[in-house]
Amino acid sequence: MAEPSGRTFSDADEEIMRATYRALREYGYADLTIKRIAAEYGKSTAAIHYHYDTKEELLAAFLDYILNRFVASIREVETTDPEARLTVLLDKLLVAPQENPDLSVALLEMRSQAPYNEAFAERFRQNDEYVRYLVKAVINHGIDEGAFADVDADRVTRSLLTIVDGARTRSVVFDDVGEYERARATAAEYVDATLREGDA
Amino acid sequence: MAEPSGRTFSDADEEIMRATYRALREYGYADLTIKRIAAEYGKSTAAIHYHYDTKEELLAAFLDYILNRFVASIREVETTDPEARLTVLLDKLLVAPQENPDLSVALLEMRSQAPYNEAFAERFRQNDEYVRYLVKAVINHGIDEGAFADVDADRVTRSLLTIVDGARTRSVVFDDVGEYERARATAAEYVDATLREGDA
């Protein structure tokens, strides 16, 4: 499987993405404007429009950007042991967003707009497919090595991502980052029940 | 625990709620107006404003209305066997919305607005607390009767609702009602792993 988005970011793009990140955290999705992103960027709105025609195009790029960041953080993990890798993946997917609760808010707003915005829908689908590919590969590796029970890796992966998405939604709707820690425990229980049943 | 919302609906309220339901399915949350609800209601906007001052007030009432409907559907279940009741509860929470996919879309939009709308946030919290109360009571009943292992019922309940909310979000974002069926299987696996471990 290739890079998740296939998109690379120039230095200017990177700066605009970081400005978008700050603006989304401050204003949320509904009140986000190119003007506000430009203010964070420290340049004119024309300087942003030189790179992105519309706000929607910029936000679609932003979704690629945060997936790329997630994938880069996964690449840093050097262990090839399937159990350790699965633990790290779940830790990263379910870490409580202590420094960016407002980005979670903006992301849920963008998710809720997927039915109306094909560019968003496509990115969320791509992101989900890529993360599923990563989790499934680790589970299949563990099955091959005899570390995990011989399960349907796709099914187990989808269950884990349902738990992840439940935590993401609940933490925003109920304004409670504790949802992540509880979901991490649920995911661990689910992993123990499904993947370890064969080697008790 | 008292009625979830404590709110009762007059015949006129009921009709307005049904009109809101249809309007939400047709237009979604963002494009919903009192005028569109009035068109579904078959009366003037003034007739709606006689009951509800603002759109937000009406929609908060609508969230009470759908919780009342859910609770009423639970009441119909006559079995007192904890295992059978838990199955029914999970079936009802995770039934694929074949006839109202667009209501799920509108509900996710409203959930994403909870951080900005205290009336919505309060309703979603109330709904969640009430459903958790129902699930937890069934699990505790099963523990008391020796049908379930002696688990922390609150923890297991929260895990199950995280799976439910994951399915709700994913079905909208990925436009795939199959998420419900898969999540129902995940919930069943989780129930088997946690509640049945003691009586294998």
Image (cartoon, coloured by chain):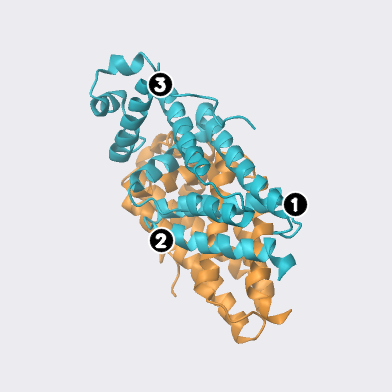
Chain colours: A orange, B cyan
Subunit of label 3:
B
| Screen quadrant of the C terminus of chain B | bottom right
Q: Could you say which disc has been placed on residue B178 in the image?
A: 2
Sequence-first tag of 1 and 2 = 1
Q: Residue A88's spot in the image, x, y percent?
A: 66, 66
Horizontal side of A6 relative to A131 (left or right) equals left
* For residue A186, above or below residue B4: below
Q: Residue A179's spot in the image, x, y percent?
A: 64, 48
Q: Which residue is mark 1?
A: B144
Q: Nearer the viewer, mark 1 or mark 2?
A: 1
Q: Distance between the Cα atoms at labels 3 and 2?
A: 36 Å
Sequence-first tag of 3 and 2 = 3
Tell me whether marks 1 and 3 sit on the same chain.
yes
Disc 3 element: loop
Task: Please identify the quarter of the rendering in which residue A91 is found.
Answer: bottom right
* For residue B66, above or below residue B165: above
Task: Please identify the quarter of the rendering in which residue A187 is found.
Answer: bottom right
Q: Which residue is mark 3?
A: B10
Tell me whether marks 3 and 2 sit on the same chain.
yes
Q: Give the amino acid type for the residue marked by disc 3 in the picture.
A: Ser
Disc 2 element: helix
Q: In this figure, what is the number of numbered marks?
A: 3
Q: Give the amino acid type for the residue marked by disc 1 in the picture.
A: Asp
Q: Residue B34's spot in the image, x, y percent?
A: 31, 24
Subunit of label 1:
B
Q: Distance between the Cα atoms at labels 1 and 3?
A: 40 Å
* For residue B111, above or below residue A183: above
Q: Give the amino acid type for the residue marked by disc 2 in the picture.
A: Gly
Q: Distance between the Cα atoms at labels 1 and 2?
A: 35 Å
